[in-house]
Amino acid sequence: MKRVAFVGRLLLLVVLLAFTIIGIFYLFAPVYDFKTPQQFSGDLIYNPYQNIDSATWKKANFHCHTTASDGHDKLEVVQKAYRSYGYDILAVSDHNLVISQGLPAQEEIPTYEHGINISKFHSVVIGAKHGSIFDFVLLPTESNHFYTLKWLRTQGDIVIFDHPDRTRWLEPEDVKNLSYYDMMEVERGFTDGVLSYYDEALSHGHYSYVLASDDCHEVGNPKHFGRAATFVSTPTKRYADIKKALLSGHNFGLTIPAFRDSNYRRWRHFHLPKIQSLKVKNDSLELVLSEPATIKVFGHSGVMQFEYVATNQAKVPFVKTDTYLRFAAIFSDSVTLYTNPIARYKGGAFPVFQDTSSVNYPLTVLYILGVSLIVLFSLFLFFLVLVRTLPTRFFRKVKRNKVAWQYAKSES
């Protein structure tokens, strides 16, 4: 029984120490107030595809894992699998860790997935020098989410809002105040407009580009591997060119079903549909794809404005009441293509990252005081349990050794 009690106290010490460290992270984040975001408006139209070179599309994946974190396969196995399926660009994004991929220096894309919180509020950071475990682990608030994204912007070149539909306790309306991310990972609402986190953000003036990724943890599992790709229009595979292309919106996303026929699946990966052109002409948008599809056009609040069946072209009016439009094309085998949004703006640089936040200093002070009390109480309990745990196993032994040493010294 004494041994069981001792082990129980050790486990309690570990829990209390972890809780104290977790609590310290919360002391860094202020409490924010948010003004009502402004939707896109203006006479100018931002189209990231206006002068795109369709001959330079390169297939990429920026979100997958190896055994360096929670992946099933080693780096070289992951790289070989993606190369065998026609991926030109691969960035491994292990959890909270940037690893070298053994590529030429100019082609290395330092990337990691940030987030150790229980709500799975994660972000991929491209261009990061190192990973980090700084996070709000237990039930992060809206202010915590906002602060995390704002802080991540200082840690790398590109911040990607990961799998919003798989983030626990995050509803679409919860993203209306979040900013400081450059891209959002494809979720289910991209194709039906219902409960779409992306459309909620766009409708509140937060412009970002799309990213389609595997989030692969096991390359041998068709439900994990090869289920998505982001095509980037870049002249080379150098990171500088890829970064410039992604930050300019010269990309589109594709999701790919886990086809039962492995031969067709591999063939399809080498023959995926592409955007040939997407131009603004006389207040209309003209999309041309490489093969026919059902083309859906979504606008403000994710409302589907138009639908075209069995065609590789769509000409859509972009009227003054439209704040933005985006396309989703579903092909005959359920491969689905997603474009970046075409949006209205008033002038100057676009896209802009709308920050509607202001620090609520009185609430922040109360918040920090409350967290400090919790942390101090946890620390007090830690030392209380420590003192009650170690005397029989440690302090008494130290005391006996000290007495024996003093006695031996006096005898000599």
Image (spheres, grey):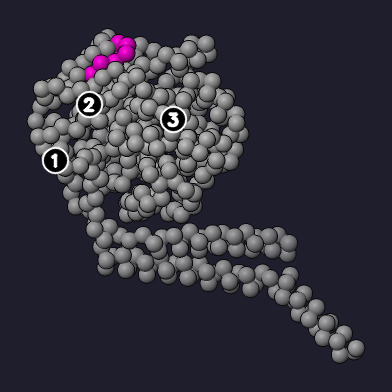
In whole angstroms, how far apart are the C-alphas of marks 3 and 1? 32 Å
In whole angstroms, how far apart are the C-alphas of marks 1 and 2? 17 Å
Q: Earlier in the sequence, mark 3 or mark 2?
A: 2
Question: In this orientation, does residue 221 appear?
Answer: no
* Quadrant of the snapshot with the C terminus: bottom right
SS at mark 2 in the image: loop
Out of 108 and 43, give the one closest to the viewer: 108
In the depicted structure, whether residue 186 falls above or below residue 161: above
Q: Decide: marks 1, 2 in contact (CB < 8 A)?
A: no
Identify the residue position indicated by label 3 in the image: 237
Residue 288 x %, y %: 25, 16
Dot 1 alpha-carbon crowd within 10 angstroms: few under 14, some 14 to 19, many 20 or more: few
Task: Kindly identify the amino acid type of the residue bearing the numbered disc 2.
Answer: Gln
Question: Residue 151 lies in magenta, yes or no?
Answer: no
SS at mark 3 in the image: loop
Identify the residue position indicated by label 1 in the image: 347
Q: Which residue sits furthest bottom?
A: 410
Q: Earlier in the sequence, mark 3 or mark 1?
A: 3
Task: Identify the residue at image location x=52%, y=35%.
Answer: 104
> Bounds of the magenta span?
287-293
Horizontal side, residue 3 vs residue 52: left or right: right
Residue 140 x %, y %: 39, 52
Residue 343 found in image quarter: top left
Horizontal side, residue 129 vs residue 333: left or right: right
Task: Identify the residue at image location x=32%, y=37%.
Answer: 247
Q: Decide: marks 3, 1 in contact (CB < 8 A)?
A: no
* Quadrant of the snapshot with the N terminus: bottom right
Task: Kindly identify the amino acid type of the residue bearing the numbered disc 3.
Answer: Lys
Mark linked to residue 50? 2
Task: Identify the residue at image location x=58%, y=34%.
Answer: 75
